[in-house]
Image (cartoon, helix red, strand yellow):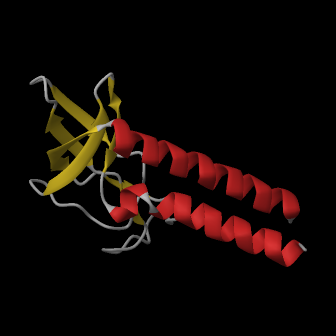
Amino acid sequence: MVVVGAVLMAAGLAALAWVCWVRQTGHHVQGVVVSSGGERSASSTPGEWSPGSGMIWRPVVQFTREDGGTVEFRSKIATQVRYKPGQPVPVCYRASRPQSVVIDTFSQTWLIPGFCLVLGTVFLVTAL
């Protein structure tokens, strides 16, 4: 339990540091959802699909860099929240590496690091 907690804490801290660094040093622009990016989740059973179940969303977003270039990317974070095509979303990217980008919403930036930190803390506290 201690090892699992330590790994989760380390992953959460690394993700938190990366998100803070990108948000602090990056450029904040408005993007637009190009595609909802629906995918079947690994847990969905073929032939038993029903609307709203077994789907995860990794939206494809396009934004214009401050130098005028256009970037299109698929979110690295899968969510059950469906973004609609044409929906504006806040984006934060690094100028030196525009592929290093996040959709700047709570669920896309803070949820995973926070979840890892909380779960890691629970594992560590219960192991002691």
Residue at figure coordinates x 30%, y 36% from the top left: 93
Query: Which residue appears at 21% of the width and 52% of the height?
Result: 90
Q: Which residue of the protein is positioned furthest toward the bottom in this rendering?
A: 126
Q: Is residue 110 left or right of residue 66?
A: right
Quadrant for residue 107, please give it: bottom left
Using the image as rendered, state which of residue 25 and residue 94 is in the foreground: 25
Front in this rendered view, residue 112 or 82: 112
Question: Residue 36: percent from the left, percent from the top?
Answer: 23, 54
Which residue is farthest front?
Answer: 24
Quadrant into which the C terminus falls: bottom right
Up/down of 122 relative to 97, above or below: below
Q: How many marks?
A: 0
- Compared across the picture, whether 122 is left or right of 110 comes to right
Q: Position of residue 116 (x, y in %)?
A: 62, 62
Q: Is residue 69 visible?
A: yes
Image height check: is 20 above or below 43?
above
Residue 3 lies, in percent from the top left, at: 85, 56
| Residue farthest along the right direction in this orientation | 128
Taking the image as shown, residue 78 lies to the left or right of residue 65, namely right
Residue 26, image x and y in percent?
Answer: 31, 37
**Can residue 42 be seen here?**
no
- The residue located at (71%, 65%) in the rendering is 120
Q: Is residue 95 left or right of residue 3?
A: left
Identify the image quadrant of the N terminus: bottom right
Of 111 and 45, which appears nearest the observer? 111
Nearer the observer, 27 or 88: 27
